[in-house]
Image (tube, rainbow, N blue to C red):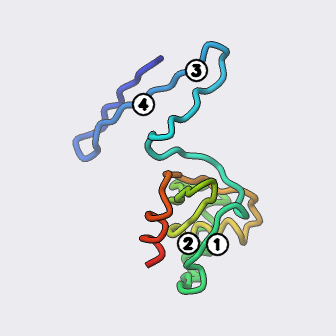
Amino acid sequence: MANFLLHLPNNFRSFSVSASTSSNGSPPSVPQKAGPVILELPLDRIRRPLMRTRSNDPQKVKELMESISEIGLQVPIDVLEVEGEYYGFSGCHRYEAHQRLGLPTIRCKIRRGTKETLRHHLR
């Protein structure tokens, strides 16, 4: 396994990145207790339970559409995975920008949760 340490200026935090492959060259599987994972998910796989209770700023969505078209999505949206279902509670403007651009997927930071965690988010 290779380890890399990236040092940034004092106003940034230091962090390490590691990568490895299995003996057959395929990426390692993610352990069940691992932290967040970044993946591209199809928009139609992400449930947006608070969509009806929130409205997006049309100007912000337009600006994001322009930015995403030019340089791509820079910050993934946060998604909670509960029993194989994906729930998005943030990133509403980025999600709508992807929808309006007709993009089939969006980069997500996925963390696993329980039904209790999901209930907490729905309060």
Cα separation between marks 3 and 1: 35 Å
Determine whether the residue tagged by mark 3 lies in a helix, strand or loop. loop
Q: Residues within 10 Å of mark 2 (few under 14, many from 20)?
A: some
Q: Residues within 10 Å of mark 3 (few under 14, many from 20)?
A: few
Determine whether the residue tagged by mark 4 lies in a helix, strand or loop. strand
Q: Is residue 101 left or right of residue 122?
A: right
> At which x and y percent is residue 83?
59, 55
Which residue is at a point 42% across and 70% down the rendered structure image? 120
- Closest to the camera, between mark 4 and mark 3, is 3
Query: Is the Cβ of the residue at disc 4 closer than 8 Å to that at disc 3?
Result: no
Cα separation between marks 2 and 1: 6 Å
Q: Quadrant of residue 30?
A: top right
- Amino acid under label 4? Val
Determine whether the residue tagged by mark 1 lies in a helix, strand or loop. helix
Cα separation between marks 2 and 3: 34 Å
Residue highlighted by disc 1: 96
- 71 or 43: nearer the viewer: 43
Residue highlighted by disc 2: 92
- Amino acid under label 2? Cys
**Which label number is shown at residue 17?**
4
- Amino acid under label 1? Glu
Residue highlighted by disc 3: 21
Image quadrant for the C terminus? bottom left
Give the answer, above or below, for where 26 lies relative to 116: above
Which residue is most to the left? Answer: 10
- 17 or 50: nearer the viewer: 50
